[in-house]
Amino acid sequence: MRAEAAPAHVALRPPEQVMRLARMGSFHASRLSFMRILMRRMKAEGWKFDCPVFDIDAHGVGHAVLSATTPTRTYSLVAFAHDLPAEKRSDRVIAEAWDCTYALFDGVPTTADIARLKANVPLQEAGRVSEKELTLSRTNRSVRMFDHVVDRLADGRQPDEDMIIRVGYLMRTTAVYGSGKFGASDYRAICDRPEFAAPFQAEMLTVFLIRDFVLRLAEHLARVKGGSGAVHLAAPLARRLGIGNSTGLGMAPYLVNHPALLNNWIAARETALARVRALPGDESSSREFVDLVARARVNAADWHSDHPLQQAKLADLRPDLDKLAEHLAVTPLSGPTPWDDLYTWGEANLTCEGQEQLVSLMLEPHGAVVDDLADTMSLRSPPARIDGSATVGATRAALETTYGWALETDWAARDEQARVWYVSAEKLEPRLGERFEEPIERYEQPLSPGRDAAALRAALAGWADDALIADLLLAMPEHRHMVRRIQIAQTAPFGEIRDNTISATVLPIDMLRCKLSFFGAGHFDPRSDRWVRINMFQNAPYPGEVAGTDADDWAYPPL
């Protein structure tokens, strides 16, 4: 069934419900996550993969080139492996050395290209790349896991399965830079290519190829150590290994700074949910869904965290999935509106964590109905400029509609403005400080739209409804950014977070999880309320397996 053939009588959930941080911080990966979009394209277009260069010595030092060839182009991951002393291994952004460093090259690199990259890529921020590079990245070993796998394979044995499931990766990235950073190609130069039409596709391709390189490196070191007695990692165990990632506060402001793009992501997901809720019963989809719920329960059981915030979420999720399975056992997905009935049941019986897991699961059996929405998730041109001809009255009404919650907030209360977003001078990275405990207020970034909306309404108070907003902004230009946001919100209602981003109780990891769920990440493991570890491409096929497997059925582990 094509998406446009689906009934359209189920309304989208309102932004007031969806765009609360507690709910955004409960999102799960789905068919519309960027990893899944990339994998579907690889399979559909018959991409070819190769490793034409693997020049790594017995100490694990050297370089390799892994290629991905589309119907029209080739992209090459140029990987550099280093002998990193343990004392230099750090996941912090201020690190200066890593186990491996990478660049995604646009085309097939020459010897001169590799020499140039060798002089710059291992330096990461301290080096420079060119418009021929699409991304810059680095990884560090999960040392105990990496050494365990190498030692077992060298000894002719497979690694401990429980350990692989518990850790889930051999290496983790601490950054995947793209979109013009450090001299790399700007997204505008490649956004018209079909393979990069969806968001963050170059970054996802980078991580996908890194995962393959890391496994090749581990097996290479096992052969060096074990000789002819060494074995390859068994395919089922290899699939359980993804690429870890450590992400901190640097990602959180992205959602505030890109309201139109955020709207496109959320609107696609909400439209997909509405389409599925409108569908009648179907025996095949129902069977697949029941199976997916069982796999999601395995996934939740395998998901571990030592942080109290995530432990509380898992304490909600696991019983919720049990309830869902019990409900399905006595309530068949049949009749005219089974999916709408199921979602309505979920809202009444599941926690926020369970409800959002249910949303992702409901999309899974319905690719023919929802996958086309991937084409709506990018933003290829900047939002329109401020419309100065808008009236003060219209602006005032728009504020009430989008920022009603903020206009009722007591912004004089210390707890409502306890935090300050600023940029560190040392690393030019976002930070979140305490307004009343640190001398940082003069460095504050405009990352509190709610407070700014209340300030704009106060500024409008003395102006007639028919006055032009251009006149107000000429008199008070400090409100330009908020007028622009509110005008964007008129056509992008899912672009505004409906919560206070500077309150004493704000949890930045809610913003991190929202964005990372759209990447396709899983097994969120917060290390504080400001940074989190995740797993990417866990359970996915490797490059050599894409052609012969279902490249879209890997979000949940097999039973």
Image (tube, grey):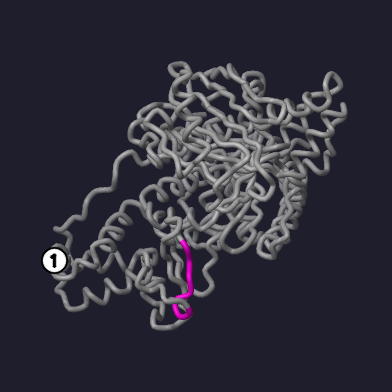
Rendered residue at 73%/45% (across/down): 299
Whether residue 370 is visible here, answered yes or no, is: no
Quadrant holding the C terminus: top right
Q: Is residue 493 above or below residue 60?
A: below
Q: Is residue 400 left or right of residue 472?
A: right
Along the line of sight, the residue nearer the viewer: 450 or 502: 502
Say few, some or many: other residues with alpha carbon within 10 Å of mark 1 (under 14 / 14 to 19 / 20 or more).
few
Residue bearing mark 1: 474
Whether residue 559 is visible here, answered yes or no, is: yes
Rendered residue at 71%/58% (across/down): 314
Rendered residue at 79%/35% (across/down): 149
> Identity of the amino acid at label 1?
Leu
Q: Is residue 59 above or below residue 325?
A: above
The part of the chain drawn in magenta is: 431-437
Q: Is residue 130 left or right of residue 367?
A: left
Quarter assignment of residue 62:
top right
Q: Position of residue 111 (x, y in %)?
A: 48, 19
Looking at the image, the residue that sits furthest to the bottom is 413
Question: Is residue 433 rendered magenta in the image?
Answer: yes
Q: Is residue 210 above or below residue 452?
A: above
Q: How many marks?
A: 1
